[in-house]
Image (cartoon, helix red, strand yellow):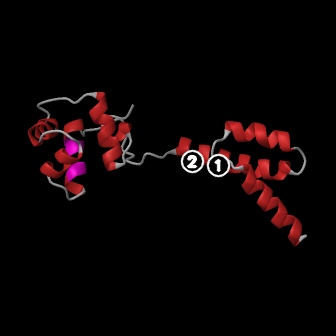
């Protein structure tokens, strides 16, 4: 685990400042009082998990970054990139397999909710028209 000098409190305050937002605005957006946000930012209080999740969503940062376990602010990482790559390859496989076995496509479509068999059918028809 990285040894970082940041703290949750300083990270929370820095995210707000770099976003150009006031404590009042952020507190209002996160549905807490400005006083409570101030306590979180100066380290006087520690938030619960629900608030940590809301802050991650609000600033679009990872929980690891907010909790000082990583310097990577992005929600995405190698795992997300690998998952996207896998889904892209799986979609290509399904499109290629469609003409051979529609049942395989239906089974995989159940596993991958972003796959739409009608798109594969359309791509296959377009490819057939070209050839």
Name the residue rendered at 77%, 36% in the picture.
Answer: 107
82 left or right, relative to 123 = left
Q: Position of residue 50 (x, y in %)?
A: 30, 31
**Which residue ends up furthest to the left in the rendered image?**
35
Label 2, secondary structure: give it.
helix
Q: Residues within 10 Å of mark 2 (few under 14, many from 20)?
A: few
Q: Front-most of 21 and 44?
A: 21
33 left or right, relative to 113 = left
**Which residue ends up furthest to the bottom in the rendered image?**
130
User: Residue 111 magenta-drawn?
Assistant: no
Q: Is residue 68 visible?
A: no
Q: Residues within 10 Å of mark 1 (few under 14, many from 20)?
A: few
Name the residue rendered at 17%, 39% in the picture.
Answer: 32
Q: CA distance from mark 1 to mark 2?
A: 6 Å
Label 1, secondary structure: give it.
helix
Q: Front-most of 67 and 48?
A: 48
The magenta stretch is 10-16
Q: Which residue is mark 1?
A: 85
Q: Position of residue 4 (x, y in %)?
A: 30, 38
Q: Quadrant of residue 64?
A: top left
Name the residue rendered at 17%, 52% in the picture.
Answer: 25
Q: Front-most of 3 and 35?
A: 35
Q: Position of residue 96 (x, y in %)?
A: 83, 52
- Mark 1 near mark 2, Cβ–Cβ under 8 Å? yes
Q: Magenta part mainly helix, strand or loop?
A: helix
Q: Quadrant of the N terminus?
A: top left
Q: Which residue is mark 2?
A: 81
Q: Quadrant of residue 124?
A: bottom right
Q: Position of residue 98 (x, y in %)?
A: 84, 49
52 left or right, relative to 99 = left
Q: Quadrant of the C terminus?
A: bottom right
Q: Please, is residue 19 above or below residue 52 in the view?
A: below
């Amino acid at each position: 685990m990285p040894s970082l000098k940041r703290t949750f409190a300083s990270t929370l305050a820095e995210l707000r400042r770099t976003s150009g937002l006031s404590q009042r605005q952020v507190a209002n957006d996160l549905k807490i009082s400005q006083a409570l946000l101030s306590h979180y930012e100066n380290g006087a209080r520690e938030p619960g998990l629900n608030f940590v999740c809301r802050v991650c969503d609000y600033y679009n940062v990872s929980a690891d970054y907010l909790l000082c376990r990583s310097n990577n602010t992005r929600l995405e990482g190698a795992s997300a990139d690998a998952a996207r790559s896998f889904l892209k390859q799986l979609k290509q496989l399904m499109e290629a397999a469609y003409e051979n076995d529609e049942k395989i496509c239906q089974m995989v479509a159940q596993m991958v909710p972003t796959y739409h068999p009608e798109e594969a059918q359309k791509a296959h028809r377009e490819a057939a028209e070209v050839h």
